[in-house]
Image (tube, rainbow, N blue to C red):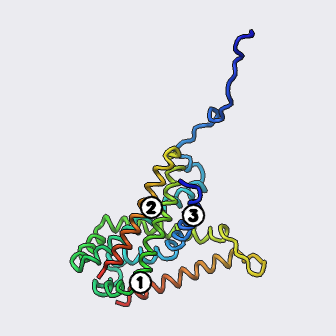
Amino acid sequence: MARPLTPFLWTLFSAGGTVAALLYPVHLFLTGLAFPAGWLPAPGYSALHGLVMHSLVRLYLFVLVSLPLFHWAHRFRYTLYDGLQLKHLTALIAALCYGTAFIGSVTAGYTLLTLR
Amino acid sequence: MSAGVGYTPYHPRWYRRRVSVWWWMESRSYTGFVLREISSVAVAFFAVVLIALLRALARGPESYARFAAALASPLMLAASLVAFLFVLFHAVTWFHLAPTAMVVRVRGKRVPDSVILGSNYLAWIVLTAAVAFILLRG
């Protein structure tokens, strides 16, 4: 991994961690638990679709997916290094982690841009 | 005695003690560290759920209904519950770490940790209420 990239990746990690800390609990609670389990009335397809039509909501959703993915990539990379003692695979692990976050972000961005 | 004086090159790696892969079970703070690291997997899990939700929304009502049904399966509910606990753990530890990681100064004086921590929790409450309001309006 090129040294000059490190501060940039750390900034993504930090921003993603903040987004995940502030917004993931409520979204995960509602979308993953309360709505599927029927504890709270879930918004229907047309209501959600209407929301996603706003460009600000699209930008919000892109940030909500992308930054936390880079947060994961950074943390998981060091989990593999330190936790499983895989320090010799540095380049491979970094490429896999950041590559996955990049692909996820592109998928989210493409879906949001082409959603009609 | 003149032939070849034995010389061993200094090689620090030879003296390194092997550390078990389970080193983080040895103390509570190590375990907390590893749990924080693992919480990132829960974060990635939910990011992928969100991507799948967006794809389902893009494909249309039938696809979205199938996605909603998949989220209600016992396996996904269990996974979401575990992920939710880890994400909560991430949020709380992240807020408590913030004052240490980022020192804020106002007019040359350091802002007390409790103020930063308090504003983190305040932002959390306000954003949670805003998201819940928008999604529960119907």
Residue A107 vs residue B99: left or right?
left
Mark 1 chain:
A
Q: CA distance from mark 2 to mark 1?
A: 25 Å
Mark 1 — residue?
A57
- Expressed as whole percent of the image width and height from the top left, the position of residue A11 reads 57, 67
Q: Position of residue A22 (x, y in %)?
A: 52, 76
User: Residues under labels 3 and 1: Cα distance?
Assistant: 26 Å
Q: Residues within 10 Å of mark 2 (few under 14, many from 20)?
A: many
Q: Residue at x 62, y 80 (%)?
A: B119
Residue at left 43%, top 72%?
A65
- Nearer to me, A101 or B100: A101
Instruction: From the image, tell me which residue sits under label 3.
Output: A10
Residues tagged by mark 3 and mark 2 found on one chain of the structure: no
Say which chain tag 3 marks.
A
Choose mark 2 or mark 1, whichever is in front. Answer: 1
Question: In the depicted view, which residue is nearer to us: B75 or B8?
Answer: B8
Kind of residue sitting beneath label 2: Val
Taking A7 as reference, is B77 left or right? left
| Residue B123 in sight | yes
Q: Circle 1 — which element?
A: helix
Q: Is residue A50 above or below residue B90?
A: below
Q: CA distance from mark 3 to mark 2?
A: 17 Å
Which labelled disc corresponds to residue B41? 2
Compared with B109, B137 (above or below) is below
Q: Which mark is residue B50?
A: none
| Quadrant into which the C terminus of chain A falls | bottom left
Name the mark nearer the viewer: 3 or 2. 3
- Res. A32 in view: no
In the image, what residue type sits under mark 3?
Trp
Check disc 1 and give the amino acid type: Val
